[in-house]
Every structure is written in C-alpha cells, then in structure tokens.
Image (spheres, rainbow, N blue to C red):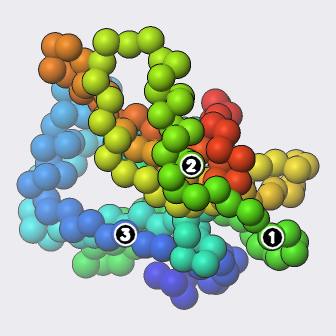
C-alpha cells in the first residue's frame, strides 16, 4: 500500500493502525445501518461469507514519530478515530477495496524555530484549572495525555505545526452514563486549543 500512496503523491511519513475485520462483524454493522436507514437496504450486501474478511487501515501523518492533526473537527475524534486519520483503507483478498486520503500536508519544512515547551506537570496544572472553571455535577477522570502536532493556518495554503498535548478524559454523569471527551493544550503556552468546527 505504501507504493500505491507514493504513486498518488503521498510522500510524507504515516503511522498506520491495522484492524482485522471479520465478516460476522461487518454483517452486524450492515444490519444496523439498514435498521437506521431503510434506503440503505438496496445498497446492502445480501450474503456475507469468509471471503469478505479483510483489514481496515487507519493512518495519520507524523513528524519525528509524533502524529499531526489538522485543526478541523469532523465528528467525534475520540470514539471514532477514523475522523482524525489522513488515510482510510479497506483491503481484502482481492486487494484494496476502499481508499480515502484527506487533509495531507504535502510538504513539511523546518522553520528554525526552537519550541520552549512547558513541563508535563505545568500542562496538568493547566488542565486542572480548566476543569475547575467547569460547572458540572459529573465526575471527570483523565485517562491519557498524548503529545502531537496540530496545524495552525498561516494562509490558505500554508500551515504552521504547533506542539500540543491531547488530554483524553471520561465524563461520568450521576446516572452512571459516561462519554469520552478531549481537551487540547498548547505545549508551549499552556492555553487551550479550540477546534474549528465545520
């Protein structure tokens, strides 16, 4: 697949994650889709078998081994990691059946700027201050801090990569229900980075 991407002009490093998809799981998802939308019944695959088993690949662009996320929010980037992926592909015994490429930075060059990043302890303090300002009865459990880069638009065609910490946390309501949430903190300033909603 790497060769195919290079032929399509995708030359920057990508960090892939591979999931095995068995036909039973895909059949269940297909049935759920039909139940939610009757119009999808005509497009549904009627018969599923082991021949449909394959691999679902998600890949994100990376710099120095760290992922790069476009500062654009499409759906839920926590529970649906495909929303932050640059490349989505599905491969079965017959080859690539689906390939989507989005939000790829064509060329990444050094600016010479040296980032003076805050310690992780100060980042944690910044997150605590944010939570302290939130009025809620829900319990908040921080599950993970992940270092990454995020794009910041300079012009219509040029972006700057800024270092950020993704704080993934669970918000647990009094009734026991919960949902995963995310806060992004600028690793240099300690300020929250907001999504551009589209």
The secondary structure type at the circle numbered 1 is loop
The Cα atoms of the two marked residues, 3 and 2, are separated by: 31 Å
Cβ–Cβ under 8 Å for marks 1 and 2: no
Q: Is residue 135 left or right of residue 114?
A: left
From the image, tell me which residue sits under label 2: 122
Give 166 or 158, whichever is nearer the viewer: 166
From the image, tell me which residue sits under label 1: 114
- What numbered label is drawn on residue 17? 3
The image quadrant that residue 117 belongs to is: bottom right
Give 76 or 129, whichever is nearer the viewer: 129
Where residue 44 appears, x then y in whole percent? 25, 42
Residue found 20% across the figure and 43% down from its top = 29
Above or below — where is 161 with respect to 172? below
Q: Is residue 167 left or right of residue 148?
A: left
Viewer-side label of 1, 2:
2
Classed neighbour count for the residue bearing mark 3: other residues with Cα under 10 Å, few (<14), some (14–19), many (≥20): few
Where residue 135 appears, x then y in whole percent? 44, 12
The Cα atoms of the two marked residues, 3 and 1, are separated by: 30 Å
Classed neighbour count for the residue bearing mark 2: other residues with Cα under 10 Å, few (<14), some (14–19), many (≥20): some
Viewer-side label of 3, 1:
1
Above or below — where is 194 with respect to 53? above
Residue found 47% across the figure and 67% down from its top = 59
Give 72 or 132, whichever is nearer the viewer: 132
Where residue 77 appears, x then y in whole percent? 45, 43
| First along the sequence among labels 3 and 2 | 3
| First along the sequence among labels 1 and 2 | 1
Toward the bottom, the furthest residue is: 3
Residue found 32% across the figure and 29% down from its top = 140
Where residue 154 appears, x then y in whole percent? 88, 50
Above or below — where is 112 with respect to 155? below
Residue found 27% across the figure and 66% down from its top = 19
| First along the sequence among labels 3 and 1 | 3
């Amino acid at each position: 697949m790497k060769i195919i991407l290079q032929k399509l002009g995708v030359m920057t490093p990508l960090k892939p994650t591979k999931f095995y998809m068995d036909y039973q799981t895909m059949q269940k998802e297909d049935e759920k889709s039909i139940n939610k939308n009757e119009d999808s019944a005509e497009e549904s695959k009627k018969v599923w078998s082991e021949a449909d088993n394959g691999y679902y690949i998600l890949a994100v662009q990376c710099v120095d081994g760290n992922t790069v996320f476009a500062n654009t929010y499409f759906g839920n980037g926590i529970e649906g990691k495909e929303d932050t992926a640059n490349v989505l592909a599905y491969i079965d015994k017959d080859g690539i059946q689906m390939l989507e490429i989005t939000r790829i930075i064509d060329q990444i060059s050094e600016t010479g700027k040296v980032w003076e990043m805050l310690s992780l302890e100060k980042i944690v303090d910044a997150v605590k201050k944010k939570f302290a300002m939130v009025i809620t009865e829900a319990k908040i459990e921080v599950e993970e801090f992940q270092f990454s880069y995020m794009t910041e638009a300079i012009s219509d065609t040029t972006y700057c990569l800024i270092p950020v910490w993704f704080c993934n946390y669970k918000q647990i309501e009094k009734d026991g229900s919960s949902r995963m949430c995310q806060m992004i903190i600028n690793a240099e300033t300690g300020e929250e980075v907001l999504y551009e909603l589209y």
